[in-house]
Image (tube, helix red, strand yellow):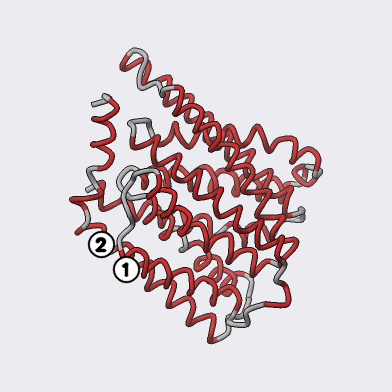
Amino acid sequence: MESRSGPLAVVAAAVLWGTAGTAGALATAGSVSLAAARLVLGGAMLGALALVTAHRARRRAGRGNVPDAATRWTLFLGAAAVAAYQLCFFAAVARTGVAIGTVVAIGSGPVFTGLISWIAGQGRPSGRWALATAAAVAGCAVLVTGGGGGAGGADAAGIALALLGGLLYAFYAVVAARAIGRGMESGVVMGVLFGGAAVLMLPVLVLTGPAWLARPSGLLTALYLGCATTGLAYLLYGRGLRTTPVATAATLALAEPAVAALLGVVALREHLSPVSWGGLVLLALGLVVVALPARTAAASHAPATETARAAAGTG
């Protein structure tokens, strides 16, 4: 039952991520300051929940499942990657434009995730995953750019930063999946990653001017972005990673731009061209194809967590 709900949890996380743009459009704050506040608040929430979960685990089972030194170091690097991703993404958008920066960063994430998980020994992604991911990334590109290509905004440094952002996202996703596969609670893993990132991003929030948080509308927006689109979303994403291969989860997360586009049409009265609607359909088809094999591939992928736990001696 849990293996079936894994992809649904990832898609639910992506739906919450997709609401961030619409919520952020209602705030009178700079994009970097808004992202920093979102990460600081969401990371604080996840970190607090992780402390509670770890304390309960220790009370139930003595020391509980304490990660080894290598896992602790990779989680620390993962937290740094979470913070660095935010900075790379906004720097890329500033140089190359929202459309191209978003497509390159979000679209390259699943590709890098599949490659890193393969290199890390989590199995080679299937041919069906590759085809469906290619279709989903193409649909995402068409949806965001409207088929226009946006070559005029192409900047080599900006594209490089966006690709680095996609690589950083892939890295912390694989780090989270490996830690969960070794028996750590998914909530604790996300708490360590995003709690650590919150500490790193706190100076960014201070330097970019948090005065907008004193206004009720600004504070409510930041709380929603932090608690819902970061805290709750990554709890769901971590739960999904328990039974969903990380490469599949990264592709399913491409539902985020689809939700953002639909909310833009409904809530912000934005307009999608016929080409963009076609990209949305192609993206949806790619996500469906990625999700469908989960049931038939259970024999090769679902036991991954239990195998890792056995190898680590966690039972």
Disc 2 marks which residue? 293
Dot 1 lies on which element? helix
Residue 94, by quadrant, is bottom right
Residue 289 is marked as 1
Residue furthest to the front = 119
Residue occupying image coordinates x 48% and y 55% = 112
Residue 53: percent from left, percent from top: 42, 26
Question: Is residue 226 shown left or right of residue 16?
Answer: right
> From the viewer's perspective, is residue 195 above or below residue 82?
above
Dot 2 lies on which element? helix
Looking at the picture, tell me which residue is in the foreground, 237 or 296.
296
Residue 103: percent from left, percent from top: 58, 66
Residue occupying image coordinates x 34% and y 12% = 62
> From the viewer's perspective, is residue 7 above or below residue 285?
above
Numbered label tally:
2
Residue 297, by quadrant, is bottom left
Residue 18 is marked as none
Looking at the picture, tell me which residue is in the foreground, 47 or 124.
124
Question: Is residue 74 shown left or right of residue 60?
Answer: right
Going by the numbered disc 2, the residue's amino acid type is Pro
Residue 290: percent from left, percent from top: 33, 64
C-beta proximity under 8 Å, tags 1 and 2: yes
> From the viewer's perspective, is residue 240 above or below residue 62?
below
Residue furthest to the top = 62
Going by the numbered disc 1, the residue's amino acid type is Val
Query: Is disc 2 surrounded by few (<14), some (14 to 19) or many (20+) residues within 10 Å?
Result: some
Residue occupying image coordinates x 50% and y 66% = 259
Residue 210: percent from left, percent from top: 78, 42
> Quick one: quadrant of the C terminus?
top left
Question: Is residue 138 shown left or right of residue 118?
Answer: right
Residue occupying image coordinates x 70% and y 35% = 202
Residue 26, by quadrant, is bottom right
